[in-house]
Image (spheres, rainbow, N blue to C red):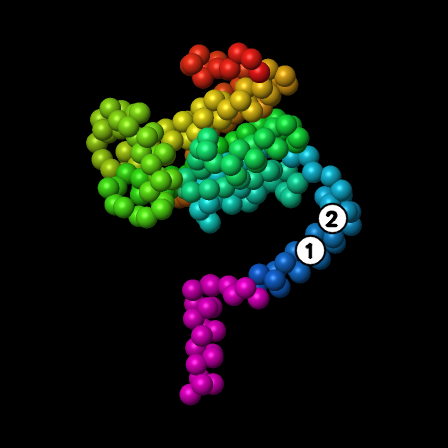
Amino acid sequence: MHNMCIPKKIDYYKKYKMKTYETLLQNNKKWAEQSVANDPNFFSRLSSIQSPEYLWIGCSDSRVPPDSITGTRPGEIFIHRNIANMVVHTDLNMLSVLQYAVEVLKVKHIIVCGHYGCGGVKAAMTKKSLGIINKWLRNIKDVYRLHEDELNALPNEEDRVNKLIELNVQEQVLNLAKTSIVQKAWKENKAPHLHGWVYGLENGLIKPIFEMPAGTHIDSIYEFDNL
Ligand code: CO
């Protein structure tokens, strides 16, 4: 009986194309070999210097891998991901990534990339309590309240979700511009350029929806004059 169970399990993995962790390690070996075969200096070059031009702030969703969808290679994008690609000013993790990217790596562009069908945004639009994640999603509810009239004027739930996904990306770009880290960099280096994008799960295409070139003025109450 026991022997019969094993092939069944393998069939199950094959059928649903699931990968075990061993497969990941095997793939890694192949990838490392292939990378060196294509470019003998690939790892020696990457291990000595990191100078990406881009900081990516994206959703943790497994279907939105920044490197694959932008055709970029290791070393090209500095990445921070969280649920629903948020820029929350009390998030020490995000702030540390932002400060390092802007002040040390001196990235030229920061991209906030959301995606249609985002579960985080959908959850924020319900009245369901989900535990500790409520506190994170409340930031998205705030975006909803800010744009309530525009959102409520839309005819159906799908349109409202998609619009909130776009508006949320826009608000997170604005949140970046409100940080002293970005404002100081704009004053000193005339960089970085901020971008708000939304990725489509159905067609794989990225739609740029909002941008703020370095030095863009924001509501003056947010502008620091002693940086
Ligand atoms: Co998402």
Q: Is 6 colored magenta in this rendering?
A: yes
Residue 221, percent from left and from top: 42, 14
Q: Is residue 194 left or right of residue 151?
A: right
Task: Count neighbours of disc 2 (C-alpha within 10 A) and say few if under 14, some if 14 to 19, many if 20 or more.
Answer: few
What is the secondary structure assignment of the residue under circle 1? helix
Q: Is residue 214 visible?
A: no
Name the residue rendered at 46%, 45% in the picture: 60
Name the residue rendered at 65%, 56% in the picture: 31
What is the secondary structure assignment of the residue under circle 2? helix
Q: Nearer the viewer, residue 17 or 136?
A: 136
The residue tagged 1 is 32
The residue tagged 2 is 43
Q: Is residue 176 left or right of residue 122?
A: right
Which span is picked out in magenta?
1-22
Q: Is 8 colored magenta in this rendering?
A: yes
Q: Nearer the viewer, residue 205 or 4?
A: 4
Q: Magenta segment, principal secondary structure?
A: helix
- Spot the residue most to the bottom: 1
Q: Nearer the viewer, residue 136 or 155?
A: 136
The correct choice, above or below, for 187 with respect to 161 in the image is above
